[in-house]
Amino acid sequence: MLPSMRAKEQNNAANATPNISDDASDISKEQDSAANAPSNISDDGSIDMSSVLQQSQVLEVLEKLDRELVGLKSVKTRIREIAALLLVDRMRRSFSLATHPPTLHMSFTGPPGTGKTTVALRMATILHRLSYVRKGHLVAVTRDDLVGQYIGHTAPKTKEILKRAMGGVLFIDEAYYLYRQENERDYGQEVIEILLQVMETQREDLVVILAGYKNRMETFFSSNPGFSSRIAHHLDFPDYSLEELLAIAQLILAEQMYRFSPEALSAFEAYLQRRMQMPRFSNARSVRNAIDRARLRQANRLFAKGGKVSKTDLMTIEAEDILASRVFTEDLPDDEQQSGTSQTTVFHDPDTSA
């Protein structure tokens, strides 16, 4: 009886999913559209592309993305192409030319720590600055934030997340866990049905990004063709090379006003060569964690030494701060345990008005 009750509930959810945005949101969207709508221009007139770009401040976001992320040339190229499309659509409206909002739901595939969340956050900002979404915030979730544990729990839970994401971007990490073919009592299918409907009917007010390992996402799409047909952009985030990881480390250090001594730089390169072959390596995330632990060791070294400390001492990571890692002492990865408890995360770009 339980499976049939669940099936009935899923059918009801699929057939009667309400419009997630409320009246206030609709009014806000209309106001934003009116405020950002370009004035009509005569057929023989022209628009200065540079002025439109400057007004939207999109180049600023793209340049920030270039500074923040090493490599990822193909990803950055696609983001620029999407920005160009939205910018041209905005200019077309100035001439009263027909424009149809493009489908911008995306799939980000790749291992952890390759910049997927950062790119999603910048994409949300671009969409907002080009008037595609109202707010430009990013809501990051996993299966546990969407799927309920009992009958009647999943639909309200999913709709609440969607309501929070409206006007921005919903980022679903490890999206393939929504679908568990081996468990007929799993409620993930109900989430999928609700998402599919909202992705189609409210795509002008919400962009959904599905993320995860490439092979698992391919299996997920083959099992759920409705998702595949609604995803317009598939972006692959490859593992970083050793040289790129070293460049990322230097960016992190500069941001925090630290630096490696020449010996420490050599030690960190040796650290990465070992760590990349060990379990739970997470690219840029592992680099940041390693630097955090090196800072901890540096602080303890200076504390134990006592006496006078110079500005250079406070800024410099030495080789011993790297070589004390378990990667060298025990041939084991440093402790990088990740919490198994899911928590919805909402990101706001400081330059984006909510």
Image (tube, rainbow, N blue to C red):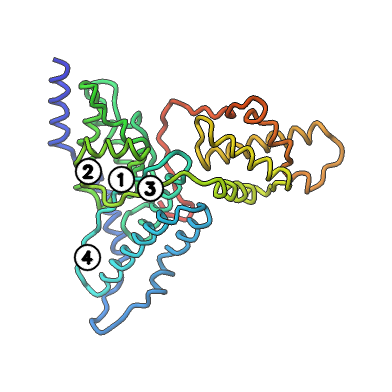
Decide which of 162, 218 is in the foreground and name it: 218
Left or right: 187 with respect to 213? Answer: left
Residue at left offset 19%, top offset 47%: 201
Q: Relative to 264, does residue 93 appear above or below in the rendering?
A: below
Task: Give the mark nearer the N terminus: 2 vs 1.
Answer: 2
Rounded to the nearest angstrom, the CA distance separating label 3 from label 1 is 16 Å
Residue 95 position, x and y percent, is: 24, 75
Q: Amino acid at mark 4?
A: Thr
Tag 4 residue: 99
Residue at image location 68% in from the left, 45% down from the top: 265
The numbered mark at residue 236 is: 3
SS for dot 1: strand
In primary-sequence order, the first of circles 2 and 3 is: 2
Which residue is painted at 37% across and 57% down in the image?
78
The residue wearing badge 2 is 198
Residues at circles 2 and 1 in contact by the CB criterion of under 8 Å: yes
15 vs 266, nearest the viewer: 266
Of badges 3 and 1, the one in the foreground is 3
State the residue position of label 1.
208
Label 4 – label 2 distance at C-alpha: 21 Å
Pointers 3 and 1 in contact (C-beta within 8 Å): no
Decide which of tag 3 and tag 4 comes sooner along the chain: 4
Q: CA distance from mark 2 to mark 3?
A: 25 Å
Q: Quadrant of residue 190?
A: top left
Q: Residue furthest right?
A: 307
- How packed is label 1: few (under 14 Cα within 10 Å), some, or many (20 or more)? many
- Mark 4 and mark 1 in contact? Answer it, CB < 8 Å: no
Amino acid carrying label 3: it is Asp
Residue type for callout 1: Val
